[in-house]
Amino acid sequence: MSYSVIVQARSGSTRLPGKILKKINDKTLLEYGIERIQKAKKIKEVIIATTVNEKDDVIAQIAKKNGIKYFRGSEADVLARYYYAAKKYAVENVIRITSDCPLIDPDIIDLSIDNYERNECDILTNVPNDGQKLTYPRGMDVEIFSFEWLEEAFYKAKENYEREHVTPYLYTNVKDVYYDKAPKDYSQYRLTLDTKEDLDVITQVIQTLYNPDKTFHLQDIIHFLDLNPDVRNINSNVKQKEI
């Protein structure tokens, strides 16, 4: 089986406009995320799914500059954007990662693929949304599902929230959901990009740990935050937006 990572990315954001285009050391956070995803050993490719809006021309330009495949589609109907991106590039299995995850650990992507195959599930997620316990930090978010399930969702999902968030239809209709859990509960760490506080934490992590010749991993981030509780606490009170 082959796996393609589709990264949904747009420059608009209500809480922190232009967040993925913020630069640290002359590189955008979108580029940091792509670079980290590409270090996963078990993926075929990375595809950026952005919008047709003029303000997202810059995202298409970043994709071109970095030799990354991309697709431009609806801003509001993200499910359709994913479907047409996957169809254009003949994707077999989709790994959904958002551009809000510039610190994504490539090892977690590879481990997720292993667990997806081992458990023969319809969808794998490490971000449970049905009351089960979150164990990975937000910002390490991975979902995996087949193109066939994506196609069914595209044709049958009717509610706005189902089309804006891509996978809600799947969780309601698939037979087998596998919840991937971290070896320990790391849910108290927040590594996603949504607010100015999140940006401050991510900036500190990258400025301290980034090395173009060596990949840092989740354990390295946690070690840094544990040694620097003042950094860890910057976004500790930020609440994740609800679907």
Image (cartoon, grey):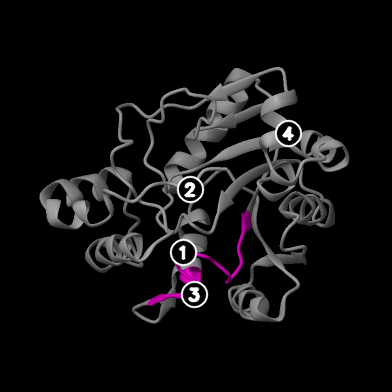
| Alpha-carbon span between mark 2 and mark 1 | 10 Å
Corner quadrant of residue 16: bottom left
Percent coordinates x, y for residue 31 in the rendering:
49, 69
Percent coordinates x, y for residue 171 in the rendering:
66, 28
Task: Determine crowd level at label 3: few under 14, some 14-19, many 20+ residues with C-alpha closer than 10 A.
Answer: some
Check if mark 4's residue and mark 2's residue have beta carbons within 8 Å.
no
Of the 4 image quadrants, the one containing the C terminus is top right
| Alpha-carbon span between mark 3 and mark 2 | 21 Å
Q: Which mark is residue 241?
A: 2
SS class of the residue under badge 4? helix
Check if mark 4's residue and mark 3's residue have beta carbons within 8 Å.
no
Check if mark 4's residue and mark 1's residue have beta carbons within 8 Å.
no
Disc 3: which residue: 21
Percent coordinates x, y for residue 76 in the rendering:
72, 59
Q: Residue furthest right?
A: 155
- Relative to residue 141, is residue 191 drawn left or right? left
Q: Amino acid at mark 1?
A: Arg
Disc 1: which residue: 15
Q: Nearer the viewer, mark 4 or mark 1?
A: 1
Q: Is residue 67 above or below residue 113?
A: below
**Residue under the point 77% across and 47% down:** 91
- Relative to residue 222, is residue 175 drawn left or right? right
Disc 4: which residue: 169
Q: Nearer the viewer, mark 3 or mark 1?
A: 1
Q: Nearer the viewer, mark 4 or mark 3?
A: 4
**Residue under the point 53% across and 41% down:** 142
The magenta stretch is 7-23
Q: Is residue 94 above or below residue 74?
A: above
SS class of the residue under badge 3? helix
Check if mark 2's residue and mark 1's residue have beta carbons within 8 Å.
yes
